């Protein structure tokens, strides 16, 4: 029942929501999650192509790049719906963040190529510019015409499937945003198993050589990149909010149907109050994301920034808390791998840990607010 | 007394007009009062200023001397009031009796009572709770028996806010003992100077006498003081609240308390301690996010919608956050938490203990948070049993 | 096999003897296993070493091949076991079946089964829970009908720990459908190789197959496999737990988890962050104080007393603390909380996610914490209704 | 129901407990609290004399000083019982801490005089050596034979009634423990209202001159003083544990008797579980104090120290938490001043704030434990 409530006069948002729900009906998220995990695959590329066909990829790319030119409001609706349905995909990074980085770049052939591929689903463009809530800049050095890159970046999703990475490099005291082919010589990958059972990679660059036309932004403004990350945070928050809402609903449904001592366990007052608190948390998360969206659509940069930090912190904590409590309410069934609720918890942890953790973001909020 | 169609103004224009006037007219010595519930005598100047301006009653229709504000404008009214630190005025007449009479009163009742509320001549209090009917109003026992054109009232009310400073009380009384518990209740308007009415103030944890017991010993109330139909009082009493339930969730008190916490923390250098910063950040963000959720409901009112039972989530979060903030304040105070007296800082005193004790109340009053959760479980989540 | 009157030794002497032998004989590769419930095959060497020494069964009387330890000595046994990081062995035979048979079994049953538990020939599992009788055992439905000297068993058990590695199961079955729910239950010993017994392992959150479903399809169990009187199974099943309930409250898991948290924090420099230090301190002191409370109950056992229902407070605090510690571990891990893999430190890996997921279980199993609170409310606090 | 459980073979502890209960029957604690508060008095000196007659003052003073020479175990039983009954007194400071400081001092006429008066109740000897969990050392300077003292000490209880103060002073690089007559010239007092409505004072010393025979310890060892404070902390913890236990019982009794919706509110599951948690907290507090007592009776100094920190932290938090929650369970009645439960909360806060606050002590515990 909880979901983001936003004005939707022409019904566009509802349509987007429905389109994800229809998609999910034929491709149940938990089933995909289990399949990926079983095969140690990092993403479902076939589904990614279908998402491209549905028009969900590069939604926020401007029209001149072939995108839909839609805003974070529309993206958030899709992300929320994906979260509810637990459809696994690198949407936040390989669609939202990549799109915003490309949108921020000046016109170039490489940019057009990537944008086109991203929208079509034919290029899987994975940004690898951030870890632990902070930007990661590789060491770059000009060698004649080419740029030599060294360094490593942790926590990269979809690194197996990626066709291109987007990276930041420090070259001669300037920050460059670069496109990096995934088959670049000198680029290697070390995998860890992520909480969802799919790989999370560390990219290791040893003397990668990149042609000058791969440079997307020569002198990237930290603020521009930060803004892109903030919007990606809102997408992640919306997905987390969807997870929170659905996990609450599952807890509600399970406890309403589960009979113990001759009564549904949802009729016990302790369970009822706990459900009320979880519902309230899910509602708070949804409202926090809406708040961030509305500030981002306005003019006040500082207010937007704070609203984003708040939304990501709230949605991360709510999703994880609700899924944890839901597992407990499921009883022994919640502790089985067969039950989907555990998958919701694992995804909540995965998304909660990316682009800055709740506690870190809260402290950041207060520091930035007080710096006024 | 100038009257305007306030609702036709753009929100921001109304906000500016209202704020400017309030800022000019609310006496500075009444701003940011330590007391949550000052008496009429204490805030008389402000009450009268509002009354003269015609701005005392934001929601009453214009024909009755109110501003006739729609919910959106009313929100602005409340917001600016809080932002400027204006004191709460005794508002049972304005907030409860007025709407009750406007909706259910006879023409005579309206003519008699509404002007006297606006003038400050009548101070009202609210006789709902009884010693054995706290959260459970349906079991109330104060009785009223109709004899010779009078209701003879016997019984006792409790937690009657500011009854010792009021001259009128509207009471829920049982007029039919045979009916089911929630039926058989009526609303009476009672002149507190009638023989048989006794008031005993009760001190609270902070030593203030905000509320009272009111005893009725064969008080003879003329029959025309009945509001609405006999035995329909329960429905009446519930219906007057309307959109104002949202204000139980307005983050006013936690906001004030967090400001005080920040002041104390700044003075004590606590922001240099990451442990404090981390706990403060949690509280700050809870307050911030409460604001986002409040705004969600406010938007419904602004667009002309009606609030559902779900708005109670704000009240729960709000009152529990208020407690957590004041608990943090005592922790921050260190050994100074042993003081009743306000704590000194370079920028004025911080009433840590006052707020800590005050924060015990809102989670209890206005329907305890347990009752709120019971209602949400049933009415919003649709849980069984 | 040397036997000694262990109880006559001073506690500290016993402790030393036991610890030294365990430290010498428990294979180092089995210490501090990641797995909470290893199978017999995985810990066979350790099982057999204990068996040969005669130390496999701390509580059984000496005449049955146990050590006959009193509760005080048993506590030492368990403490040292935990301190040295020895793995849990499959202990349903030793901990549950043995005591059951010793108390209620026939001479033949004792002679047949006890030696085979000690030798490791029989691995037992426990058939209590059913899909619709989790916390509510009284509503169990697996039926056993006596026909021609056999009980014919039909039904399903669930959450049967290590059933896929067991060859015998003791099951609660309903032998009288007319009786009140808690009556009409009996205990049967069932050879799992009998036709009609099927086992299906269930993976848990950590991907391990600790527990199983066990299906009974007209399984013919010889009548002499009944333990005690027919229809008295509920009483039997409850009575064997005895003083061992205290171990549900032993802070073993939170202790281990806090050690891991400390290791990770040291490696990540988190002790320099007062915000972490403050949260860590709360967890550390909760663990420390749980130890003090555990000690209070242990003292009762040591002095020969019996434990009341109040000992369940330890189980609640213990299992919730375990969760809080592992939640803090994920917070400390930062973005590394996204890993299933163990986290690397200079002093060995820390299994953060493994512990976090494992900590979900103890608050559910062994009587959920809600059930425990219900029992405490009634049995200890004497609350009404 | 919750209380400290300790071996009591000869029944001594039970007798002490009973004697306090009998005392409380004739002098109900809440009544005394209200009377003191109404008159702005800092203590009930008449009751203090009665406590002396009961043999409770200077209980831990060694026999050669005329004391009972009993240990912290006996003191804790008295303190716990005083806490339960809410009998207000400066027991922790003016009896326990003073006794221990005097016991640590070498033989002297002044020491004997104070000990004698303390035991008889005729001298009210108030230690003023600590604030905010730390020792406070006054500035001392020798002026010929006398010692001149300057400085101030906050949070001094019973400063109106005190006949003598015990203070610490830094004189020529050495720490002195001094006795200071309350009528000393140059000694003044500023009062604040404490949370219980009774005064808490700030002692201000401006050129106080103290005769050399007032020096109790010339070169006080910080460890000795710290040990005295630790024992006082255990007394305070026991009192807090008594408050916690009684506040729990009051919550239990109130909710069992209070009927709403046709049932005692203690029959609602949410209330039951809350009561269980409060009961558990009270039990934990009692066990923590017992643990500290047992370590203090042993040899291991570091273990004792940690156990004391843990006990004070646990008992402070438990008492305050339980009283707060009890107020909520009392509903509107809990918010009245008429109900005694509020008095329990206020005392819990008062004692919780003295000799180090829970959070501070917990951090101290970890720092000291890790320093090993």
Image: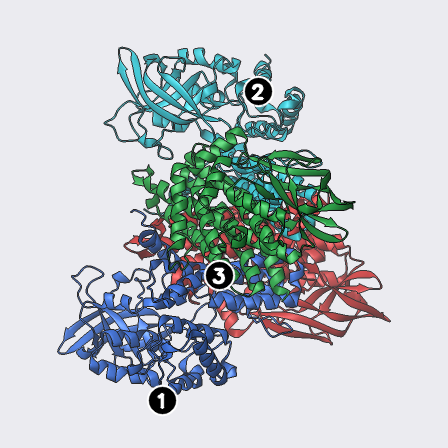
Chain colours: A green, B blue, C cyan, D red
Tag 1, which chain? B
**Can residue C173 be seen?**
yes
Residue found farthest to the bottom: B1
Q: Secondary structure under badge 3?
A: helix
Decide: is C25 above or below A14: above
Disc nearest the viewer among 1 and 2: 1
**Can residue C314 be seen?**
no
Q: Estimate the spatial distance between the alpha carbons at disc 1 and disc 3, rounded to whole Å.
A: 40 Å
Disc nearest the viewer among 1 and 3: 3
Is B133 left, or right, of C295 in this rendering?
left
- Please give the residue where the numbered disc 2 appears in the rendered image: C43
Mark 2: few/some/many CA within 10 Å (<14, 14-19, 20+): some
Decide: is C208 above or below D247: above
- Please give the residue where the numbered disc 3 appears in the rendered image: A294
Is B302 left, or right, of B284 in this rendering?
left
Is B67 left, or right, of D139 in this rendering?
left
Query: Residue at position x 36%, y 66% from top?
Result: B303
Decide: is B319 above or below D312: below
Disc nearest the viewer among 2 and 3: 3
- Please give the residue where the numbered disc 1 appears in the rendered image: B1
């Amino acid at each position: 029942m909880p979901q983001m409530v936003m004005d939707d006069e022409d019904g566009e948002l509802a349509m987007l929501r429905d389109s994800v729900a229809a998609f999910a009906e034929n491709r149940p998220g938990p089933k995909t999650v289990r399949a990926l995990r079983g095969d140690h695959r990092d993403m479902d590329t076939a589904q990614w192509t279908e998402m491209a066909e549905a028009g969900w990829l590069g939604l926020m790319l401007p029209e001149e790049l072939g995108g839909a030119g839609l805003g974070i409001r529309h993206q958030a609706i899709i992300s929320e719906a994906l979260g509810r349905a637990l459809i696994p995909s690198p949407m936040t990074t390989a669609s939202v963040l990549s799109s915003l980085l490309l949108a921020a770049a000046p016109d170039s052939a490489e940019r057009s190529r990537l944008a086109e591929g991203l929208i079509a689903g034919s290029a899987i463009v994975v940004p690898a510019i951030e870890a632990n809530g902070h930007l990661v800049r590789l060491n770059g050095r000009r060698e004649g015409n080419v740029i030599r890159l060294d360094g490593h970046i942790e926590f990269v999703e979809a690194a197996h499937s990626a066709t291109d990475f987007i990276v930041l490099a420090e070259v001669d005291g300037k920050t460059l945003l670069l496109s990096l082919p995934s088959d670049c010589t000198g680029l290697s990958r070390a995998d860890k198993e992520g909480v969802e059972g799919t790989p999370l990679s560390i990219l290791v660059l040893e003397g990668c050589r990149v042609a000058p036309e791969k440079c997307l932004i020569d002198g990237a403004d930290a603020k521009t990149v930060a803004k892109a990350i903030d919007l990606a945070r809102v997408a992640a928050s919306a997905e987390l909010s969807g997870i929170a809402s659905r996990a609450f609903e599952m807890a509600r449904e399970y406890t309403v149907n589960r009979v113990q001592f001759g009564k549904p366990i949802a009729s016990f007052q302790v369970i009822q109050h706990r459900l009320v608190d979880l519902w309230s948390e899910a509602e708070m998360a949804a409202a926090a994301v809406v708040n961030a969206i509305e500030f981002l659509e306005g003019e006040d940069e500082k207010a937007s920034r704070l609203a984003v930090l708040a939304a990501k912190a709230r949605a991360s904590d709510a999703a994880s808390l609700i899924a944890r409590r839901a597992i407990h309410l499921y009883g022994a069934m919640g502790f089985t791998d067969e039950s989907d609720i555990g998958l919701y918890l694992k995804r909540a942890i995965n998304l909660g840990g990316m682009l800055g953790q709740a506690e870190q973001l809260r402290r950041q909020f207060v520091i930035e607010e007080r710096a006024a | 007394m100038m009257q305007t169609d306030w609702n036709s103004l753009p929100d921001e224009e109304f906000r500016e007009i209202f704020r400017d006037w309030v800022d000019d007219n609310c006496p500075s010595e009444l701003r940011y009062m330590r007391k949550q519930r000052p008496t009429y005598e204490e805030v008389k100047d402000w009450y009268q200023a509002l009354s003269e301006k015609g701005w005392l009653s934001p929601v009453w229709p214009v024909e009755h001397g109110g501003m006739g504000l729609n919910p959106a404008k009313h929100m602005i009214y409340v917001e600016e009031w809080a932002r400027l630190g204006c004191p709460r005025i005794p508002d049972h007449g304005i907030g409860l009796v007025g709407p009750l009479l406007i909706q259910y009163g006879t023409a005579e009742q309206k003519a008699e009572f509404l002007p006297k509320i606006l003038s400050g001549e009548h101070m009202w209090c609210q006789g709902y709770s009884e010693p054995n009917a706290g959260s459970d109003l349906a079991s109330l026992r104060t009785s009223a028996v109709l004899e010779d054109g009078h209701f003879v009232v016997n019984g006792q009310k409790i937690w009657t806010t500011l009854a010792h400073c009021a001259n009128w009380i509207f009471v829920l009384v049982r007029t039919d003992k045979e009916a089911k518990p929630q039926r058989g209740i009526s609303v009476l308007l009672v002149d507190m100077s009638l023989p048989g009415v006794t008031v005993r103030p009760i001190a609270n944890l902070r030593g203030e006498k905000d509320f009272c017991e009111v005893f009725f010993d064969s008080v003879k109330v003329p029959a025309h003081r009945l509001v609405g139909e006999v035995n329909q009082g329960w429905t009446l009493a519930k219906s007057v609240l309307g959109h104002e339930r949202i204000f139980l969730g307005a983050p006013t008190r936690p906001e004030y308390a967090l400001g005080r916490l920040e002041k104390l923390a700044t003075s004590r250098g606590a922001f240099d301690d990451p442990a404090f910063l981390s706990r403060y950040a949690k509280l700050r963000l809870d307050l911030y996010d409460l604001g986002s959720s409040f705004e969600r409901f406010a938007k419904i009112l602004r667009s002309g919608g009606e609030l559902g039972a779900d708005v109670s989530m704000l009240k729960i979060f709000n009152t529990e956050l208020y407690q957590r903030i004041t608990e943090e304040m005592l922790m921050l105070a260190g050994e100074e938490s042993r003081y009743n007296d306000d704590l000194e800082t370079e920028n004025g005193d911080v009433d840590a203990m006052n707020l800590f004790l005050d924060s015990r109340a809102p989670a209890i009053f206005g329907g305890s948070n347990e009752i709120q959760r019971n209602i949400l479980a049933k009415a919003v989540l649709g849980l069984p049993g």
